[in-house]
């Protein structure tokens, strides 16, 4: 272990993931729904991602917001190298990745920021580094700026504390690289359970946790659980430190959690309604929902909008479909109290409207399907369609053409990177200012189409895709296993191309990706 890493896992790089909740499009929508003015995305703004990892979300933010100056900070040189290389490949000029620790960050000469985000960082660092990170927030956030902090919560993680400590000890004692030592550590934990250790029946939720761990990437497990520092936090402590930084809590970026009736049991929802102290409310909510992870939104300076101003701005809120089919019984939303199904009489007309294009709250209100419905109900439906991944707010349409050119370059860079070894199954969308999921083959097909255009020849596209796969040695998999038979491989690739052209292409066109 090197001294600079302070016990954070650095012998293996983190996985590259995308987090929709830290994009400006999402943050401003959440802030608006919560009744607080957000930085104007039609104007230039600045954005900082603290502990950006491989920087994939940071890159999507830069590509979808060319008017912004975007910064990513992380102390792991492998992360910064990966992110910088992809930025260069995509020709992104408005993003800078800086290799720095949180301690050094506080001393750097930086601009002030409209947005500061730290996803999955706060509970994985020491208290000293948390102070450094929040010190940067205090020093660098503009008045009216938004902060996003996500972290593990004590209420949901109390039982895992000793087990994760044990796993850390076991991996430290192993001569293997941290990710390679994961299976050995898990074996010991499972042996302990099978040997009848009383800790497990005393904490029944461990059963599911251990089962879930089995399906995760070992690099993810290494960074998630095997650092020296791993401290689930209480909302009250984070809110108090943020208050010192002149920032106050405005709500959750997990949109469904702002709706009490679906995020905690009914009796707890009543208690929340009776509780006026915002910090106490959140503490009750965390225990009420056995909350394990929070995505907090804070604002520097709390000046809620007047009702009429919020309503006027909300009328303009416009969403686009993400092409996810709605189940017959209505859309389902995952919540701490289980899956919640939306009423089809509200959601079906909205989904129908979304099929034919973007829909604003105002347009929906004027539709006969919602005549007589309270507008708050409609707004809740918009929030839940966004939260459930059925729809996404769009960015101000004025800059879409410029964004489209830059996203095209990033999507090409993603396809090129995936052709070799990377695992970035995503497309940046200039319409929604976010990324939409795909699979690796889809990114490669999109790469061909972005390079050559679509000439309507499915067979030629299949041949070209097979040739890309052949040149790069990338395998095609079924049920996780590489397909070795060439005819079988050609058939599977042909089916993937047909499915892409039939189902994905229209959605990706609608989102400005192709
Ligand atoms: C769990 S990862 C989250 C990465 C990214 N935000 C994401 O969600 O994919 C935490 C990140 O914080 C970085 N980090 C940890 N301690 C740090 C420190 N003291 N200074 C700067 N970066 C640090 C790690 O290198 C890692 O990339």
Image (cartoon, rainbow, N blue to C red):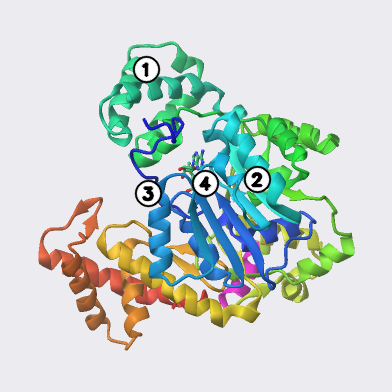
Tell me the number on the disc at residue 136.
Answer: 2
SS assignment at label 4? loop
Give the distance between the C-alpha atoms of the residues marked 2 and 3, in whole angstroms: 23 Å
Q: Position of residue 52 (x, y in %)?
A: 50, 50
Give the distance between the C-alpha atoms of the residues marked 3 and 1, in whole angstroms: 37 Å
SS assignment at label 1? helix
Specify start and end residues of the magenta stretch as a single range: 347-356
Give the distance between the C-alpha atoms of the residues marked 1 and 4, in whole angstroms: 35 Å
Where is mark 1, residue-wise?
193
Badge 2, how many Cα within 10 Å: few under 14, some, many 20+?
Answer: many
Q: Earlier in the sequence, mark 1 or mark 2?
A: 2
Give the distance between the C-alpha atoms of the residues marked 4 and 3, in whole angstroms: 13 Å
Tell me the number on the disc at residue 51.
Answer: 4
Q: Are marks 4 and 3 in contact (CB under 8 Å)?
A: no
Q: Disc 4 beta carbon < 8 A from ligand 1?
A: yes
Q: Earlier in the sequence, mark 4 or mark 3?
A: 4
> Image quadrant of residue 272?
top right
């Amino acid at each position: 272990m090197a001294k600079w890493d302070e016990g954070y896992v650095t012998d293996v790089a983190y996985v590259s993931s995308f987090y929709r909740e830290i994009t400006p499009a999402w943050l401003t929508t959440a802030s608006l729904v919560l009744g607080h003015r957000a930085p104007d995305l039609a104007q230039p703004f600045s954005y900082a991602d603290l502990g950006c990892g491989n920087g994939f979300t940071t890159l999507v933010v830069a590509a979808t917001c060319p008017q912004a100056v975007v910064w990513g900070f992380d102390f792991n040189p492998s992360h910064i190298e990966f992110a910088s290389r992809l930025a260069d490949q995509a020709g992104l000029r408005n993003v800078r990745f800086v290799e720095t620790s949180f301690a050094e960050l506080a001393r750097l000469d930086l601009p002030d920021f409209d947005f500061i985000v730290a996803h999955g960082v706060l509970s994985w660092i020491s208290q000293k580094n948390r102070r450094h990170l929040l010190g940067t927030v205090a020093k660098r956030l503009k008045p009216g700026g938004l902060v996003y902090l996500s972290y593990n919560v004590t209420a949901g993680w109390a039982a895992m504390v000793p087990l994760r400590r044990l796993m850390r000890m076991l991996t430290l004692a192993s001569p293997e690289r941290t990710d390679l030592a994961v299976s050995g550590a898990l074996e010991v934990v499972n042996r302990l359970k099978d040997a009848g250790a009383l800790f497990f029946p005393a904490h029944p939720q461990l059963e599911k946790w251990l089962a879930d761990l089995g399906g995760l990437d070992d690099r993810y497990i290494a960074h998630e659980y095997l650092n020296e520092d791993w401290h689930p936090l209480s909302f009250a402590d984070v809110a108090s430190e943020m208050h010192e930084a002149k920032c106050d809590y405005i709500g959750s970026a997990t949109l469904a959690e702002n709706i009490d009736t679906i995020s905690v049991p009914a009796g707890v929802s009543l208690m929340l309604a009776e509780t006026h102290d915002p910090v106490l409310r959140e503490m009750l909510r965390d225990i009420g929902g056995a909350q394990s992870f929070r995505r907090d939104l804070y604002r520097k300076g709390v000046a809620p909008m007047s009702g009429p101003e919020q309503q006027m701005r909300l009328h303009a809120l416009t969403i686009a479909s993400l092409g996810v089919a709605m189940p017959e019984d209505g859309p389902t939303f995952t919540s701490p109290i289980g899956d919640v199904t939306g009423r089809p009489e509200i959601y079906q007309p909205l989904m129908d409207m979304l099929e034919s294009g973007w829909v604003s709250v105002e347009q929906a209100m004027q539709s006969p399907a919602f005549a007589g419905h309270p507008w708050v109900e409609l707004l809740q439906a918009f929030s839940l369609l966004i939260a459930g991944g059925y729809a996404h707010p769009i960015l101000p349409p004025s800059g879409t053409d410029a964004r489209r050119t830059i996203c095209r370059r990033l999507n090409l860079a993603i396809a090129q990177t995936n052709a070799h070894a990377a695992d970035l199954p995503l497309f940046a969308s200039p319409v929604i200012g976010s990324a939409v999921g795909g699979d690796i083959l889809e990114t490669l097909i999109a790469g061909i189409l972005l390079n050559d255009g679509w000439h309507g020849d499915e067979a030629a596209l299949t041949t070209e895709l097979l040739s890309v796969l052949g040149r790069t040695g990338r395998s095609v998999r079924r049920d996780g296993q590489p397909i070795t038979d060439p005819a079988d491989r050609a058939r599977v690739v042909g089916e993937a191309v047909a499915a892409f052209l039939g189902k994905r292409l229209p959605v990706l066109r609608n989102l400005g990706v192709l």
